[in-house]
Amino acid sequence: MKHFGQLFTSLDQTNSTNAKVRSLVRYFEKVDDEDRLWAVAILSHRRPKRTVKTSQLREWAAEFANIPSWLFEESYHIVGDLAETIALVLPASTSGSEQSLSEVIALIKNLDKKEDEFKKEQIMSAWLYMTFEERFVFNKLITGGFRLGVSQKLMMRALARYENQDENKIAHRLMGKWTPDTTTYEELIRSENPLDDISKPYPFYLAYALEDEVGTLGAPSQWQIERKWDGIRGQIIIRDNHLFVWSRGEELITEKFPEYHPLAELLPNGTVIDGEILPFKDGSPLSFNLLQTRISRKNITGKVMDTAPVILMAYDLLEIEGKDIRQSSLQKRRSALEKLLVDHPTEGVIRLSRILDIDRWEQASEEREGSRLHNSEGLMLKRLDSIYQAGRKRGDWWKWKVDPLTIDAVMIYAQQGHGRRANLFTDYTFAVWDGDNLVPFAKAYSGLKDEEFTRITSWVRKNTIERFGPVRSVKPEHVFEIAFEGINRSTRHKSGVALRFPRMLRWRTDKRPEDANTLDDLKKLL
Amino acid sequence: MRQNRSNQLLKFTDKGIWCEKADVYIDPWKKVKRALITHGHSDHARTGHDSYLCTESAAPAIKYRLGKIDVQTIPFSKPIRINGVQFSFHPAGHILGSAQIRVEYKGEVWVVSGDYKLEYDGLAEEFEPIECHTFITESTFGLPVYDWRPQDEVLSAINQWWKSNAEEGKTSIITGYSLGKAQRIIRGLDRSIGEIYCHGAVENINEVCRIQGVELPDTILSTQEIPKKDYIGNIVVCPPSGINSPWLKRFGSISVAICSGWMTLRGARRRQGVDRGFVLSDHVDWKDLNRAVKETKAEQIFVTHGYSDVYSRYLNAMGINALVAKTEYTGESIDAASDQNTSAI
């Protein structure tokens, strides 16, 4: 636990990715195979099963710290992280833990289905002999949600460096359903594996947002214009009869999408397609939210696939018959993609992203404005003669997103933020006028600069009308322009509407509260 | 509400804490005739009053910050009578010259503690517990999560950090309020590691301190003319606002640390995006806050800036009568943008 605690501290004390990788490599060098395997498991979100309820942890921590439980809860509210709050309120200990990471995890696992008294005794005595860092890490192991400021990718980079192996090989080896209970470090990382090389994806080519007038791009005939779909950008690879699905974050997510698994049979080997992983049903895309809930699931059940079935909306072809064709023009790649999908029908698993028939930019403009009707985020403009570049590049590809909907609203409640924003009032509730009344319709907590949050925070402190626990009602004085992506009727909200992705576009210091919009204005956007 | 009862010795008004009988204000935030000032931080010592009264050791910085003002000084513990009310200043341990103000009238004693800490930092006069009937306390860090380590431990961690930066050829940048915290850091730095440079706002206060006889190690004013390479391996002390400004561009490869009680919280440090956070505060932590309140033996506590709701609820639960008092003090700010002294310099 000592080394893992130190690892946490050194990761926490730097923002440099290189320094983080160095700390991880140092950790990998210091510990044995068993601890290294557990560290890899934890950093790839494979935590031990939860054996203690968090409500019990809170209760025991308050008891240990000799404070009333409401005060513990208030502290938790400010700190924003349970494991950290517990570590902070416990009285300082005089010694650190002598146990290894694996031993501590064994202790946690051993609590499963035991009597509460036994659990309490075990946890309290573990706390007694741990430093602050060790307690924090220990609590994190129990509660899960381990975020050490290290992505899975960074961990893999460090492990690759430690093993002196290729990063993609390591990534591939770490995919799938293993846990430290079902494998050993030797077997997982060091055994021969013939699939190591064939999973390798190409770097994604990403577009910048269009800033200039669209007319500056030249004739529309030189551009391929498609809708910008709101899913997860992905790459599908079929090599040696195996399928690999990579996300734009270069995470291997093959297991998450059983819908794609038949592609290993349906498409020829040596094929790589770039596209959008899109929730799609009855001929049209579904909301991104559905995909998001699906991604966070560990097990993809039939029910999940029923509510949020996915297709691949194909944009581009990067490899065919094992040949990298990224240096060919988009026009050529596109026709190869079309031919591929005609020769190898995929039973609707892959659809071609349709090219819009545009002669004049005004038409494109109209299509863009109608994006919401298609559940799309706007348009993608790609030069017909563009090669497939690596990373985010200007010039040949542009995304032209639809403008958000906006409304001017009055701030009526404020609440302090959590974690990173503790002690600042950052979460606001906004209202519009309904006659002489202000009706709340949206909450938002992003879009302002830190400096603006600071100013509003000191204003809130001086202009609080009433306090309801952590929420304060404030003088209806400040007007904000609220942007959102969509609006739906809702019976659950007092205002009768629900917004999608509301955020603060700007603080309208030039407007008085009476200048804000009305509920009728809002409903016109439905 | 109790705090508005007319026979109270001190009242919380929209100008500040007011003693009606003597017609003086303590740390007022609006213009008044006569102001008694606990210490020189800008949320307590504001400009525009007709006259000021503060301790001898607090005066130089207050005069320096507020310019031409009418300041009278008084030694610690020496009583002064104003219209039959007796006032005296007692060490608060917050920064050099900082005071708690004791107010006594017809046997009733109130203490306004301003900002304070119990740990002796070698710079501020050591906090002195004063028994009273009513105690007015801050609660900047009034939650059980705030638990300071001894100063020596923190300073040695700072020196260790500086040393390892120096070994990597980096310049160390460390922030603390120009008045108080900066000098506390400077006094604790290990000169065997390298030179100490200071931001102008800090260096000006250093000079004020030196003139009044405070011993500080040698420091160098950081100017634009100094080439980047001169800073390598050395440390630069700057106010919190320094790290979000173009001023930082005059250094090469840097490691940045903030010194503040807020650095207890991982979230607060991550939000500032700095490399290190050292937990070093000039305010009381949870244990010392409770100790201080207890030692006053007060029957009534007014809780001002900080976690005032939570802390007053806690005191009431412990059987101590406590109320929240609304003031415009800010305590130690969590944000780099709101340094207390750079704007005045």
Image (spheres, rainbow, N blue to C red):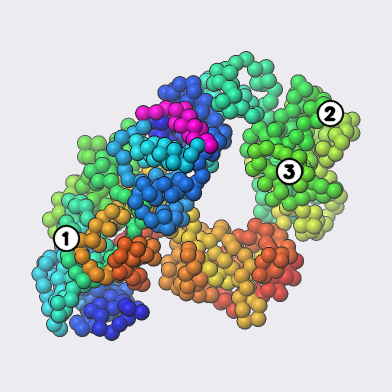
Residue name at image x 65 percent, y 57 percent: A501
Farthest-out residue, top: A192
Examine the image and state in which quarter residue A184 appears.
top right
Examine the image and state in which quarter residue A485 appears.
bottom right
Q: Please give the residue where the numbered disc 1 appears in the rendered image.
A: B128
In space, the residues marked 3 and 2 are separated at their CA atoms by 24 Å
Q: In this picture, is A19 found above or below A80?
A: above
Q: Amino acid at mark 2?
A: Leu
Crowding near the residue tagged with mark 2, few <14, some 14–19, many ≥20 C-alpha atoms within 10 Å: some
The chain carrying label 1 is B
SS at mark 3 in the image: helix
Which label lies toward us, 3 or 2?
3
Residue name at image x 12 percent, y 69 percent: B74
Which label lies toward us, 3 or 1?
3
Q: Earlier in the sequence, mark 3 or mark 2?
A: 2
Name the magenta segment's main secondary structure.
helix
Q: Amino acid at mark 3?
A: Val
In space, the residues marked 1 and 2 are separated at their CA atoms by 82 Å
Q: Is residue A265 visible?
A: yes
In the figure, is residue A493 to the left or right of A12?
right
Residue segment shown in magenta: A98-113
Q: Is residue A328 visible?
A: no
SS at mark 2 in the image: helix
Q: Please give the residue where the numbered disc 2 appears in the rendered image.
A: A266
The label on residue A304 is 3
Q: Is residue B13 magenta?
A: no
**Of B203 and B26, which appears nearest the observer?**
B26
Q: Amino acid at mark 1?
A: Glu
